[in-house]
């Protein structure tokens, strides 16, 4: 069977099904209302201590932002209005607590569901989560606790909720498989953060697996087997041994320089979304943060984060990175990232629309608040600012003028910041790449965003599965643009990095070394592999190959040429 591999690693282990027990709620008449209300309150107490435990665990292991959802659950649980209505229902209708809870929660859920606001709609999901916890308490249904397992298991579930993933004990959970989800769904992101192999979107898997079945899967390819023949188990045991061995070997590269055999040093940095990703950056020996996607601070909430909130987050990253470079990208919303409270218009072509720097130059208050927070945090480390989606010199200049205004404000207020903080741009629109010679004169650095640069150069929507075969990093047009951007930066003595997925692609890294890229920023788990590749190649040799590669006519020929000429271990 096949799904989407979202977190790498080979897993061989016994299945543990997360059963979604069908809860049947019967309407019963009761005589003693007070007793029934007491029973409900005791279910509330039990749920409360359970949610509090989860909240504390999540706060400790994942941080405040992830924990807030459980704070919301507590508020729903203790909502006086809901309790009052349930008590009234029990008394007036002389019905059991389960029935009263079902009826009242349904009206609340319907009310939130009907709201024309994504944030409020999500509250409906929270009420469902809390109601189901209460109902299980009332009906005495016990569930498997993923934090308290006796043996090693592979979890198989329809989906894993934040309550589930927050409890997972990494020592016992070898991996997990879910029926729904995609690369960026909650469970997938958590799998990568926890470094647990996982596959999502395996259709109807919960109906095909029983507890104790042998599960074998590859979290990179997305392939999985249930009770496979001995031959397959043997093959995957070998794969696992290989995977574990290469992981161990890669760990030997911790603390080593990222340097080619002919002495060219580059910087291997990490892409992060929130400060909690730093653990993984540090354990994989990231040499800096090449892309801090600040928009995550703005998501899953009903108003923009305050200056103080942002300042604390940026400062934490700067301090934890101890003077290593931290490139903070200013707000990049729009496209596939919506923020309800900004009331962004519905557009025909969101990726070509009101996005990123275009929003910031229009909603200057939001932009200034962010710039103030970044500047203030710059007093605590080696922070650099990066503007996304720049397509013209005018946009860059406008952004810099606003930045100067903010600097002057802070000076007047006697607030300290790094006056020499570097300002760079993402080169992710072909127009910027084409005029990179002129842009280079007005920035301190470039970072090439291949995720968008590929989609805009080849007119292939990066979210559209139907044309995903056309989204190809080996396209000669992309390689030519990358080469041009690197040359433009170097002519002006500016450094140039790359923070799109291509920067961590083992086949393309040697070509980028040959083109002279100075910094590579990627997901933390790719860093050591990239270092291993770089330490085995010589820049002068790669330079010759890079010159040849841009003259090959097709993506397929580019890929085959690289495979034939470069030995990537
Ligand atoms: C990119 O476009 O390459 C990039 C790194 O930005 P994002 O994926 O956040 O659009
Ligand atoms: Mg981008």
Image (cartoon, helix red, strand yellow):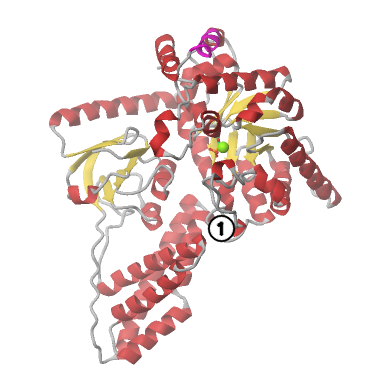
Tell me what residue is drawn at x 58 percent, y 52 percent: 298
Q: Quadrant of the N terminus?
A: top left
Tell me what residue is drawn at x 38 percent, y 85 percent: 87
- Specify whether residue 158 is painted magenta: no
Tell me what residue is drawn at x 34 percent, y 39 percent: 4
Q: Is residue 259 visible?
A: no
Q: Which residues are magenta?
A: 544-552
Tell me what residue is drawn at x 54 percent, y 7 percent: 544
- The one nearer the camera, 430 or 33, is 430
- The one nearer the camera, 298 or 107, is 107
* Horizontal and vertical percent position of residue 190: 42, 46
Residue that badge 1 annotates: 340
Which secondary structure lies at badge 1? helix
Q: Is residue 271 left or right of residue 87?
A: right
Q: Is residue 174 above or below residue 231?
A: below
Q: Is residue 461 above or below residue 178?
A: above
């Amino acid at each position: 069977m096949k799904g989407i591999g979202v977190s790498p690693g080979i897993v061989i282990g016994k299945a543990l099904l997360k059963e979604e027990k069908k809860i049947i709620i019967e309407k019963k008449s009761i005589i003693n209302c007070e007793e029934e209300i007491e029973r409900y309150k005791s279910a509330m107490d039990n749920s409360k201590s359970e949610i509090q435990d989860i909240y504390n665990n999540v706060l400790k292991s994942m941080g405040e932002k992830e924990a807030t959802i459980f704070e919301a659950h507590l508020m729903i649980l203790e909502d006086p209005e809901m309790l009052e209505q349930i008590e009234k229902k029990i008394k007036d209708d002389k019905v059991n607590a389960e029935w009263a809870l079902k009826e009242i929660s349904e009206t609340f859920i319907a009310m939130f569901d009907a709201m024309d606001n994504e944030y409020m709609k999500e509250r409906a999901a929270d009420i469902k989560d809390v109601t189901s916890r209460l109902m299980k308490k009332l009906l005495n249904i016990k569930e498997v606790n993923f934090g308290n397992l006796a043996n090693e298991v592979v979890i198989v579930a329809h989906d894993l909720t934040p309550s589930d993933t927050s409890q997972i004990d990494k020592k016992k959970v070898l991996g997990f498989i879910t029926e729904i989800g995609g690369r960026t769904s909650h469970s997938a992101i958590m799998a990568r953060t926890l470094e647990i192999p996982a596959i999502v979107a395996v259709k109807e898997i919960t109906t095909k697996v029983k507890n104790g079945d042998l599960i074998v899967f590859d979290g990179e390819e997305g392939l999985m087997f249930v009770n496979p023949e001995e031959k397959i188990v043997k093959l995957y045991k070998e794969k696992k041994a290989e995977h574990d061995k290469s992981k161990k070997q890669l760990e030997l590269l911790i603390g080593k320089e990222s340097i080619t055999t002919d002495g060219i040093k580059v910087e291997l940095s990490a892409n992060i979304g929130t400060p909690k990703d730093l653990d993984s950056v540090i354990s994989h020996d990231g040499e800096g943060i090449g892309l801090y996607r600040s928009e995550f601070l703005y998501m899953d909430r009903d108003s923009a984060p305050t200056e103080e909130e942002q300042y604390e987050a940026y400062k934490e990253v700067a301090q934890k990175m101890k003077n290593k470079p931290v490139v903070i990208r200013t707000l990049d919303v729009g496209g596939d990232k919506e923020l309800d409270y900004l009331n962004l218009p519905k557009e025909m072509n969101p990726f070509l629309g009101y996005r990123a720097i275009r929003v910031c130059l229009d909603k200057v208050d939001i932009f200034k608040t962010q710039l103030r927070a970044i500047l203030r945090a710059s007093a605590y480390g080696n922070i650099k600012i990066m503007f996304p989606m720049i397509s013209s010199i005018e946009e860059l200049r406008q952004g810099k003028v606003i930045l100067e205004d903010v600097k002057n404000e802070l000076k007047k207020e006697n607030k300290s910041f790094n006056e020499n903080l570097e300002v760079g741009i993402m080169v992710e629109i072909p127009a910027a790449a084409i005029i990179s010679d002129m842009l280079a004169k007005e920035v301190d650095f470039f970072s090439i965003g291949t995720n968008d640069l590929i989609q805009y150069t080849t007119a292939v929507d990066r979210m559209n599965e139907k044309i995903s075969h056309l989204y190809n990093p080996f396209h000669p047009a992309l390689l030519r643009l990358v080469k041009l951007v690197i040359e433009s930066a170097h002519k002006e003595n500016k450094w140039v990095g790359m923070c799109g997925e291509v920067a961590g692609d083992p086949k393309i890294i040697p070509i980028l070394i040959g083109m002279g890229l100075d910094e590579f920023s990627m997901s933390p788990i790719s860093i050591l592999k990239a270092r291993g590749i770089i330490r085995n190649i010589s820049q002068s040799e790669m330079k010759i190959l890079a010159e040849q590669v841009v003259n090959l006519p097709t993506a397929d020929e580019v890929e085959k040429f690289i495979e034939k000429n470069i030995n990537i271990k």
